[in-house]
Image: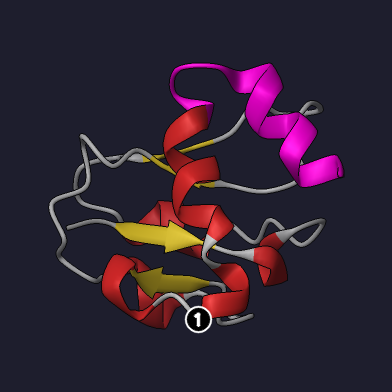
Amino acid sequence: MTYVITTPCIDTMDQSCVDVCPVDCIHFEEGLDKILYIDPDECIDCGACEPACPVSAVYAEDDVPEEEAAYTEINALWFTDKDAARAKISA
């Protein structure tokens, strides 16, 4: 399982989650991204990021609200096709 970053992060991009991640699995490209992304292959499911997020944008994969479900795919997509993931955020 992994953690997923959802819509409250868009344009907020508070990096508190990055600061507490013990495996550095949260990424973004400065000036290009509007949201942070968690690499599902690197995430160790420790949960440190969830309480660190000041806008409650981070969920365990199994707890992602139904209306935010697309972000599970978007987070993973960013690591294989950044432009496609960015297009889904902007849509």
Residue plotted at (47% across, 45% down): 73
Residue 80 on the magenta span:
yes
The vertical placement of 30 against 48, above or below, is above
> 71 and 34: which one is in front?
71
Q: Give the range drawn in magenta.
A: 78-91
Q: Name the residue under label 1.
A: 65
Q: Main secondary structure of the magenta part?
A: helix
Q: In which quarter of the image is the C terminus?
A: top right
How many dots with numbers? Answer: 1
Viewer-closest of 89 and 48: 89
Question: Looking at the picture, how far across and down is residue 32, in whole percent?
Answer: 78, 26
Q: Is residue 33 left or right of residue 42?
A: right
Q: Position of residue 85 (x, y in %)?
A: 64, 32
Mark 1 is on which residue type?
Pro
Which element is circle 1 on? loop
> Could you tell me if residue 33 is visible in this image?
no
Q: Quadrant of the N terminus?
A: bottom left
